[in-house]
Image (cartoon, rainbow, N blue to C red):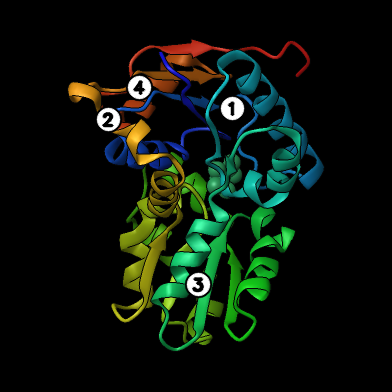
Amino acid sequence: MGRPIAMFDSGFGGLTVARAVIDLLPGVDLVYFGDTARYPYGPRTAEEVRHFALQISDWLVTEFDPKVLVVACNTATAVALEDLRVRYPLPVMGVLEPGLESLLAVTTSGRVGVIGTVGTIASGAYQQAAEAIAPDVELTCAACPGFVEFVERGDTDSEQVHVLAQRLLTPIIEAEVDALLLGCTHYPFLARTIANVLGPEVVLVSSADETAFSLLRELDPVATAEPSGRRGTYTFVSTGDVDTFAHLGRQLLGPELGTVVAHCWGDS
Ligand code: DGL
């Protein structure tokens, strides 16, 4: 295995980013870390999530010497990305900037929305980044507590999730945005419900896909070209139950998710 791309998320959601990376960069090696024992991060304090992000990243950098570290979690990106960038002498990518840049590229009205976990929206990270990149854009943010739990239960289009979406997306509807960023790893699975609530004129942008495209641009295209069709190797690590991770993870990511390695911190 060469120097891999290392990525982490609070649990399964970041597998949407991993899937997009595998599709775009099939020749590169990938290590995915899902902190399922401490999931979800969304309702936790910023200090807690920052501590987890540093702990996981220290371990990934020490164990795997990655060429890029990807924070495949919006909540962790929102509170820890800058600390991680200062800490390691390697490129550290989050899901916030790629998603936001794509959102700003597709809007024609200049009115855009971002939805995410309570932790992500409360951090103010999207609001600050948008203000810095595009101060003239009118950004409406909405936290969507409950969305992640519906997705984890495999419920993405029931009457209940539709009613919840209708309520939580009210500020987005009232702001008359023409583009909405799904600023949480799980929300792409709710795209159909969200689209039904918002109507076809609102463009939905997935931070998972945009992060993979950014990674493609970041990495040297020569170094990432597939030598004679070589496929990358994929390593999956979970702090929670590895059988559950393998089972659910395979449904989300696909057949590339093989054996899952257990990891225990010892202090949590
Ligand atoms: N991965 C988290 C995010 O993208 C969602 C799940 C959680 O709350 O841990 O914000």
How far is disc 2 from disc 3 in space, using C-alphas? 30 Å
How far is disc 1 from disc 2 in space, using C-alphas? 19 Å
How far is disc 4 from disc 3 in space, using C-alphas? 32 Å
User: In the drawing, what numbered circle is on residue 247?
Assistant: 4
Q: Secondary structure at mark 3?
A: loop
Question: Which residue carries the number 3 mark?
Answer: 169
How far is disc 1 from disc 4 in space, using C-alphas? 16 Å
Report the amino acid beneath label 4. Answer: His
Specify the farthest residue to the left: 228
User: In the drawing, what numbered circle is on residue 254?
Assistant: 2
Report the amino acid beneath label 1. Answer: Asp
In the image, is residue 25 above or below residue 193?
A: above
- Count of marks placed on residues: 4
Looking at the rendered image, the disc whose residue lies closer to the viewer, 1 or 4, is 1
User: In the drawing, what numbered circle is on residue 35?
Assistant: 1
Which of the two discs, 2 and 4, labels the residue nearer the N terminus?
4
Report the amino acid beneath label 3. Answer: Leu
- Ligand number 1: quarter of image: top right
- Residue at the image point whose x is 54% and y is 68% from the top: 114
Q: Position of residue 179 (x, y in %)?
A: 42, 75
The 10 Å Cα crowd at callout 3, few under 14, some 14 to 19, many 20 or more, is: many
Q: Secondary structure at mark 4?
A: helix
- Residue at the image point whose x is 65% and y is 44% from the top: 76
